[in-house]
Image (tube, rainbow, N blue to C red):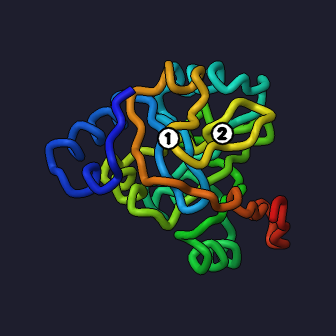
Amino acid sequence: MKVVKLATALHKPAIRKKIVDGMRHGGIFVYPTDTIYGTGCNAEIPGSVEKIKKAKGRELGRQFSVIAPGKEWIWKHADVSKVNRQFADEILPGPYTIVVKAKANAPKAIVSSEKSMGVRLPNNPFTKIIEEAGIPFVSTSVNLSGTEPVSSIKDIPAEIRSMADWAIDAGKISGPASRVFDLRTDNVKVLRY
């Protein structure tokens, strides 16, 4: 696992290009968000998604959320009513996950059996790199299922460390997990505070 400081990833063009290429081609990353450290990969590469599920010990049938490469990706891949789109426009980017109805063109690896998906757009500089890659990026906390998320790169569990290709180090992150809003109907429901 190659560890790179966030400032280096953002401001060194050669490193940034390697990271973007790695994202597009199925590399597995540990990265900062505006809430906690996440681990993820290109959601359109099922083999990489499965590696993360296996490393985390994720139960079968539980899908990961994704970081969208911009709001337009959300509108293109999700059925969101006009009122809910306005709500999402107001809160994103930010420390939130929205649960939406997936359209047929959404990546199968992230769509639940109920045809829905969780989408994030963190307010974190690393999100700009995901936007540059132009791909939906798996977003799940860096931890083994049933344990607390890690707050620094040095605390990454061995199972995740051994399968990750890159770790983007932004120092200690100790925010709570994202708040989750269900936007599958016009009555917005809070699923997690």
The residue nearer to you, when weighing 64 against 16, is: 16
- In the image: residue 175, left or right of residue 112: left
Answer whether residue 6 is visible to the viewer in this image: yes
Q: Residue at x 61, y 75 (%)?
A: 91
Q: Residue at x 45, y 30 (%)?
A: 28
Q: Position of residue 56 (x, y in %)?
A: 67, 26
The residue nearer to you, when weighing 101 against 181, is: 181
Q: Position of residue 75 (x, y in %)?
A: 54, 61
Quote the CA–CA distance across marks 1 and 2: 21 Å
Report the disc number at residue 64: 2
Q: Position of residue 135 (x, y in %)?
A: 41, 45
Count every numbered label the image shows and give the total: 2
Crowd around label 2: few <14 · some 14–19 · many ≥20 (10 Å):
many
Q: Residue at x 69, y 70 (%)?
A: 81
Q: Earlier in the sequence, mark 1 or mark 2?
A: 2
Q: Nearer the viewer, mark 1 or mark 2?
A: 1
In the rendered image of this protein, does residue 132 appear above or below residue 59?
below
In the picture of the structure, the residue carrying the numbered disc 1 is 153
Crowd around label 1: few <14 · some 14–19 · many ≥20 (10 Å):
many
Report the disc number at residue 109: none
What's the amino acid at mark 1? Ile
Q: Secondary structure at mark 2?
A: loop
Q: Residue furthest front?
A: 154
- In the image: residue 115, left or right of residue 15: right
What's the amino acid at mark 2? Phe
Q: Position of residue 134 (x, y in %)?
A: 36, 49
Q: Quadrant of the C terminus?
A: bottom right
Asked whether the residues under the numbered discs 1 and 2 touch, taking CB atoms below 8 Å apart as contact, a structural biologist would say no
Answer whether residue 98 is visible to the viewer in this image: no
Q: Residue at x 61, y 28 (%)?
A: 157
In the rendered image of this protein, does residue 118 appear above or below residue 164?
below
The residue nearer to you, when weighing 90 against 160, is: 160
